[in-house]
C-alpha cells in the first residue's frame, strides 16, 4: 500500500532533482528530502495527494511572489528616464553606486525571456527586460 506512494515520491523527486538539483543542493539533499517525506507519509498514514497539493500551492504562491517582484521593477527605458545620469556610452550604470558591472538573470531559469538586471557591486536589483 505504501510502496506505490513511496515509489511515486521517489520518481517525483528524482525528476525534480534532474531539473533543479542546484536549487535543492544536489543529490544528497534530494535523498534527505525524499527520506523525510516518505517517513512523514508512513508515520502519519497520509496520502501522497496531500503532499502534492501542498507542493502545488507552495509553488503557485512562490511563482506569484517572484513574478510580482519582477513586475514592480521599472523597465529599462523607464529606469533610464528616471536616472539620466546612468546612461553611459559603454552601457548603463547602477543608480546606487555608479558601477557598470551589471549582470542579468532569468526570472525563472537561465533561458527565461523575462530578465532582471542586478548590480554586481552593491547587489541592488535595477530594472527588468523582456527578450523578444
Image (spheres, rainbow, N blue to C red):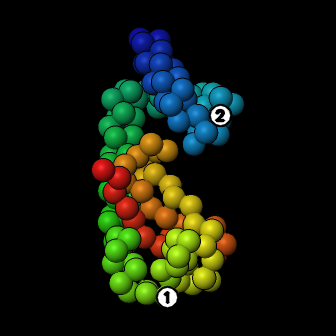
Query: Is 105 left, or right, of 69 in this rendering?
Result: right
Q: Which residue is mark 1?
A: 85
* Residue at 47% from the left image edge and 19% from the top image edge: 11
Mark 1 neighbour class, 10 Å CA radius: few under 14, some 14 to 19, many 20 or more: few
Question: CB of mark 1 within 8 Å of CB of mark 2?
Answer: no
Q: Helix or strand or loop: what does disc 1 sit on?
A: helix
Q: Nearer the viewer, mark 1 or mark 2?
A: 1
Q: Nearer the viewer, residue 12 or 111?
A: 111
- Asked whether residue 8 appears in the rendered view, the answer is yes
Mark 2 neighbour class, 10 Å CA radius: few under 14, some 14 to 19, many 20 or more: few
Residue 81 in picture, x, y percent from top left: 35, 84
Separation (CA) of disc 1 from disc 2: 43 Å
Q: Is residue 79 above or below residue 16?
A: below
Q: Which residue is mark 2?
A: 26
Residue 39 in picture, x, y percent from top left: 56, 28
Q: Is residue 113 above or below residue 95?
A: above
Q: Is residue 101 above or below residue 50?
A: below
Q: Helix or strand or loop: what does disc 2 sit on?
A: loop
Q: Earlier in the sequence, mark 1 or mark 2?
A: 2
Residue 49 in picture, x, y percent from top left: 33, 29
Q: Is residue 55 above or below residue 98?
A: above
Q: Nearer the viewer, residue 46 or 10?
A: 10
* Residue at 63% from the left image edge and 68% from the top image edge: 101
Q: Please identify the residue farthest to the front as the structure is shown.
A: 89
Residue 22 in picture, x, y percent from top left: 61, 39
**Rendered image quadrant of residue 71:** bottom left
Q: Nearer the viewer, residue 50 or 78?
A: 78
Amino acid at each position: 500500500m505504501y510502496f506505490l506512494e513511496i515509489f511515486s515520491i521517489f520518481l517525483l523527486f528524482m525528476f525534480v532533482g534532474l531539473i533543479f538539483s542546484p536549487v535543492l543542493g544536489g543529490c544528497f539533499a534530494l535523498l534527505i528530502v525524499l527520506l523525510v517525506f516518505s517517513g512523514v507519509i508512513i508515520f502519519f498514514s497520509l496520502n501522497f495527494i496531500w503532499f502534492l497539493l501542498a507542493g502545488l500551492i507552495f509553488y503557485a504562491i512562490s511563482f506569484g511572489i517572484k513574478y510580482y517582484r519582477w513586475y514592480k521593477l521599472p523597465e529599462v527605458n523607464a529606469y533610464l528616464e528616471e536616472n539620466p545620469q546612468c546612461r553611459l556610452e559603454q552601457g548603463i550604470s547602477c543608480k546606487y553606486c555608479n558601477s557598470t558591472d551589471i549582470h542579468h538573470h532569468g526570472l525563472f531559469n537561465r533561458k527565461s525571456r523575462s530578465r532582471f538586471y542586478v548590480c554586481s557591486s552593491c547587489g541592488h536589483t535595477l530594472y527588468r527586460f523582456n527578450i523578444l
